[in-house]
Image (cartoon, grey):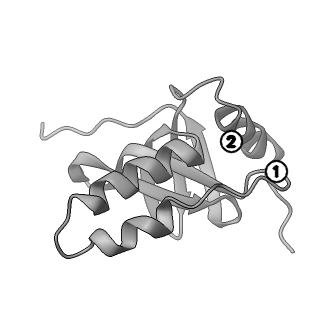
Amino acid sequence: MPKHDELLVNIAALVESGQSNQMSLTVVAGGAVITGRLAPEAVWRARVAEVLTDSDQLGAFAAVFETPVKEDGPPAHLHFHVARILQGTTGIPETGGMYRVAIDDISAWTVGDFSYSDH
């Protein structure tokens, strides 16, 4: 069993406590660089459900995200909103997306989000 990064778990717990949704973070997970702002899981789930509800093809999946959040033990995932996967000088998607990343899958991280430029 991998040892949890205590600092990262503490950041996630503070975000989950609802004390802050302004924490920007950049992580490396599975070789991908993901940058954006963290959100409490309940807020993240509500936003994903909202997006799915508005979709003709995916509306039925919204109910999966509307289920209550289980609160047992320390957070195991980070929930990013307005996030991008960075590849070269490009952020995907350009407008930001919603990503859920397992803390155990993160190999590196830094506080703040990275900007990218076409220059």
Q: 109 or 21, which lies in front?
A: 21
Q: Quadrant of residue 3?
A: bottom right
Q: Give the structural element (helix, strand or loop) at label 1.
A: loop
In the picture as drawn, the residue positioned furthest to the left comes out as: 119
Vertical order, 34 against 67 (above or below)? above
Q: Residue 64 at x, y = what percent?
A: 49, 69
Vertical order, 49 against 109 (above or below)? below
- Relative to residue 110, is residue 10 drawn left or right? right
Q: Residue 49 at x, y = what percent?
A: 38, 57
Q: Residue 84 at x, y = what percent?
A: 33, 50
Q: Which mark is residue 74?
A: 1
Q: Give the structural element (helix, strand or loop) at label 2.
A: helix
Amino acid carrying label 2: it is: Ala
Q: CB of mark 1 within 8 Å of CB of mark 2? A: yes
Q: Which mark is residue 6?
A: none
Q: Quadrant of residue 56?
A: bottom left
Q: 112 or 53, which lies in front?
A: 53
| Mark 1 neighbour class, 10 Å CA radius: few under 14, some 14 to 19, many 20 or more | few
- Relative to residue 101, is residue 107 drawn left or right? right
Q: 74 or 84, which lies in front?
A: 74
State the CA–CA distance, disc 1 to disc 2.
Answer: 8 Å
Q: Residue 38 at x, y = what percent?
A: 52, 39
Q: Which residue is mark 2?
A: 12
Amino acid carrying label 1: it is: Pro
At x 68%, y 42%, the residue is 12
Task: State the quadrant of the C terminus.
Answer: top left
| Mark 2 neighbour class, 10 Å CA radius: few under 14, some 14 to 19, many 20 or more | many
Which numbered disc flags the more N-terminal residue, 1 or 2?
Answer: 2
Task: State the quadrant of the N terminus.
Answer: bottom right
At x 67%, y 58%, the residue is 103
- Relative to residue 110, is residue 8 drawn left or right? right
